[in-house]
Image (cartoon, grey):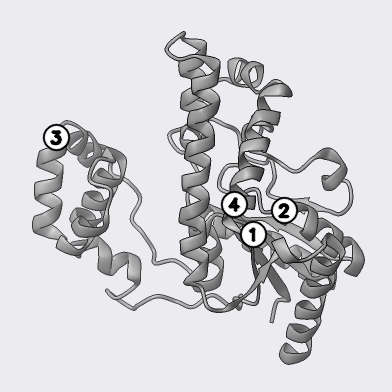
Amino acid sequence: MRRVLFIVGPTATGKSELAADLAREINAEIVSADAFQIYRGLDLLTAKPEASTLAKVAHHLVGTTPLHEEMNAEKYRRAATRAVDEIDSRCRLAIVVGGSGLYVKALTHGLAPLPEFDSKLREKLNAMSLDELRSQLNELDPETARKIDVKNRRRLVRALEICLLTGQPASEVVAGVGDSGLPRSPIPATGVFVFRDREELYARINQRVEAMFEKGVIEEVRAAGATSVTASQMIGLREIRQLLEGKMSLLQCIAQIQQATRRYAKRQLTWFRRQTNFLPINLSILSHNEAVKGVLLRAQRSARESG
């Protein structure tokens, strides 16, 4: 069985430094589970770990995908599984670190096989209005229609595409209910969920966004080339592009990115609190060294249990 430890939690919690120091302590390697840090470029915008942090131990899936490429949970699962297997072949522990819940779940639970998109069907669906898409999805898959962001055209189109290509509700396909069911991943969900008191976390987020601008994120975005649909969802990208187009002021831009990041962190907290396999650790009440020691003890305990 592969030896993997997860360190998950919301953005700006301090996962990267914690994981790097732990990995250096036990000669482990890190596999990122961040949906945007996997992209090459926009290092400030995606809050990639500092060069000094990356230099402490080997990091995988940080800055490996061009900005113009689409990414999804299945592509990530395959790449991360390869990285974990390589680390395991060196008899080292893989530490999966990140806050992208779906990417983490792809490793711990596996994913149902989803159909590739059909260009003709996609063209037909893209020509439909939002109301038409919502109405058809409600007819074919009312469960997904209740849960999905009905203003998100891309998600509506994909959900309908799955329904029409498989002949099953997308909710059943994604859950692995149809056909042969969902294969379980061989990677057990062992690890920690790190968080901070909300007031402290929000202050850290606000400070990080301000520092991002001080370090030159505007020029970074200005110099970025074409971005894929998934890369374009990075928090702050749309706002900074609007700033560059003169559609908002610098102060408005900073405030909007801070607010969007705080909301994202809140969603991450909700997601990971529901994942009961991860031991919760409040970093607000621990020093950095105490946190490293606490996670190390968790890693040693899980190693004994799996051995």
Q: Of residues 203 and 79, which is closer to you in this image? A: 203
Image quadrant in which you'd find residue 24: bottom right
Q: Are marks 4 and 1 in contact (CB under 8 Å)?
A: no
Residues packed near mark 2 inside 10 Å, few (<14), some (14 to 19) or many (20 plus): some
Q: Who comes first in sequence, dot 3 or dot 1?
A: 3
Q: Who comes first in sequence, dot 4 or dot 3?
A: 3
Residue 199 disc label = 4
Residue 128 disc label = 3
Q: Who comes first in sequence, dot 3 or dot 2?
A: 2
Q: CA distance from mark 3 to mark 1?
A: 44 Å
Q: Who comes first in sequence, dot 2 or dot 1?
A: 2
Q: CA distance from mark 4 to mark 3?
A: 43 Å
Secondary element at image label 1: loop
Residue type, numbered disc 3? Met
Residue type, numbered disc 4? Glu
Mark 1 — residue?
Answer: 196
Mark 2 — residue?
Answer: 14
Rendering coords of residue 257 (x, y %): 52, 32
Secondary element at image label 4: helix
Residue type, numbered disc 1? Arg
Secondary element at image label 3: loop
Q: CA distance from mark 2 to mark 1?
A: 9 Å
Q: Residue at x 51, y 69 (%)?
A: 273
Q: Residue at x 22, y 55 (%)?
A: 165
Q: Of residues 278 and 259, which is closer to you in this image? A: 259
Residues packed near mark 3 inside 10 Å, few (<14), some (14 to 19) or many (20 plus): few
